[in-house]
Image (tube, rainbow, N blue to C red):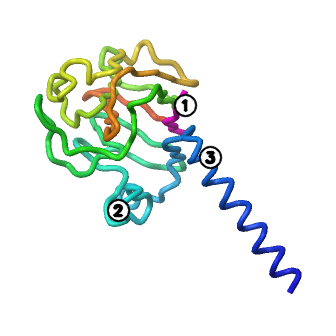
Amino acid sequence: MKRTLGLLLLVGVMLFSVVAVNANGKVILSEDFSAKDLETFYSAAYKSLPNDSSKPMYIATGGECVIKDGTFTLGNSRFTIGALDKAPTSASSTPGGVLDLSKPYKISFKILEVDGNMAKKLQIYVDNNTTGMANSPHGGASRVVSVELSQLKPGPFEVTPEVGTANSFIQLRVESEGSVVIDDLVIEYL
């Protein structure tokens, strides 16, 4: 009886710790790319939207990414994080999202490898799931990162965008002929 009560207390403390971190609102999303393959990665079973367990957290929006050994390769591809669906964004609408980016936040990940045409770019968008930076209610400001691969080096990468709403999503993209291998993606409040 004491052992069961102790175990229940330990589990309760662990759950409280997870809720406390989320209640403080520090980490919005953390991804270690541990999915066994892309089909798993893009499934709701792997990671779902917080208020709808039938919808996946990640949606492929173009090209073909690669997931292998806990790393994620973007090359001539893009995907969204936290979008409600795949409906294309425009200057007047988005499919909506589950990330509250109305407060100061940062996006960070580890760059493990950069390859291909070094003149191509790594891009990060907020509330835009297309390749055109004006296809968002935020207009051109939706593209919060656009950096040539020649400027990227293995190691930490971090950006603190000033664009977002209480119902946002993010898109990561690498242009054709380029490739970036990443790990340990984190979106968190400052």
Which residue is found at the position 67% from the left and 58% from the top? 16
Residue 169 lies, in percent from the top left, at 32, 39
Ranked by sequence position, the earlier of labels 1 and 2 is: 2
Q: Which mark is residue 110?
A: 1
Which residue is found at the position 44% from the left and 29% from the top? 103
Ranked by sequence position, the earlier of labels 1 and 3 is: 3
Q: Is residue 11 above or below residue 84?
A: below
Q: Is residue 45 left or right of residue 3?
A: left
Tag count in the figure?
A: 3
Q: Is residue 25 left or right of residue 134?
A: right
Q: Label 3: which residue?
A: 21
Tell me the distance, in whole angstroms, between the alpha carbons under discs 1 and 3: 22 Å
Question: Which quadrant of the figure contains the N terminus?
Answer: bottom right
- The magenta stretch is 184-190
| Name of the residue lying farthest toward the right | 2
Give the amino acid type for the residue marked by disc 3 in the picture: Val
Q: Label 2: which residue?
A: 52
Q: Name the element at disc 2.
A: strand
Contact check, label 1 and label 2, Cβ < 8 Å: no
In the image, which is nearer the foreground, mark 1 or mark 2? 2
**Would residue 112 be seen by someone viewing this image from the given angle?**
no
